[in-house]
Amino acid sequence: MSYIRNLFEKITGVAKLKEEAIKSAAESIKLADDAKREAEESVKIAAAANNAAAAAKMAEDLAKLGPKERATAAQQPYIAVLETHVNDQNPRNGFFELDWNEYFVVQLKTAGYYGDTDEEIVDKWFQDLCRGIGAEEGVSMDRRGSGYINVNNLGNGKSEIS
């Protein structure tokens, strides 16, 4: 029966139509697979573009920050001398305005500095720093009679030291 059926399909052209339909279906499957691969590649490219855009936005935002804010965003210690003032009548007296972030205070605490406030901790470090510079220059740092140190908390991680 199968022989007669095949012969009938061949004579009537149905066999050729079936063969063409199978080829067409195979081509459609190949085209669908190609389209799927291209779509997946497009999704990867779009994700990479989104990542690049996010990185560019982050870099732009960081560029708008000042040095203290960049260090704080990176969780790095920051200390800076904002201003240095010298008394015109008595140059032995003056003050430095310092600015720091919380990570600098943590670094000082880790190094053994202590105090009730961040300002006290930074003040102890600054005094040690000044003594060290004086000692390197051969200056006796024992009770120099140059006045006293006054710390004025300006808030926002800033102090005026005079």
Image (cartoon, grey):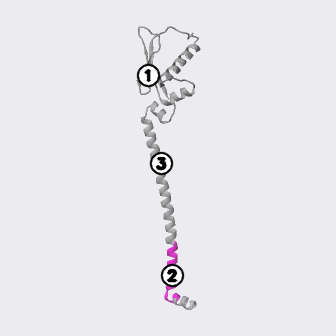
| Residue that numbered label 3 is attached to | 51
Residue 159, which numbered label?
A: 1
Secondary structure at badge 3 equals: helix
- The residue positioned 45% from the left and 43% from the top of the image is 56
Q: Which of marks 2 and 3 is nearer the N terminus?
A: 2
Instruction: Say which mark, if any, is on residue 3.
Output: none
Percent across and percent down for residue 64 are 42, 35
Local crowd size for mark 1, using a 10 Å CA cut-off: few (<14), some (14–19), many (≥20): many
Residue 83 in sight from this viewpoint: no
> How far is the residue under mark 3 from the one under mark 1?
41 Å
In depth, the one of 84 and 162 nearer the eye is 162
Question: Magenta span has 70?
Answer: no
Label 3–label 1 contact, CB within 8 A:
no
Looking at the rendered structure, the secondary structure element under dot 1 is strand
Viewer-nearest of discs 2 and 3: 3
Identify the image quadrant of the C terminus. Answer: top left
Examine the structure image and report whether residue 20 is included in the region drawn in magenta: yes
Q: Residue at x 43, y 34 (%)?
A: 65
Tell me which segment is drawn in magenta: 9-26
Total marks placed = 3
Please identify, in this view, whether the residue under mark 3 or under mark 1 is nearer the observer: 1
Q: In this view, does 70 lie above or below 149?
A: below
- How many angstroms separate mark 2 from mark 1 (CA)? 89 Å
The disc placed on residue 18 is 2
Residue type indicated by callout 3: Asn
> Residue at (56%, 28%) from the top-left corner?
110
The front one of 41 and 90 is: 90
Q: Where residue 67 appears, x then y in whole percent?
A: 46, 31
Q: Is mark 2 on a helix, strand or loop?
A: helix
* Amino acid at dot 1: Ser
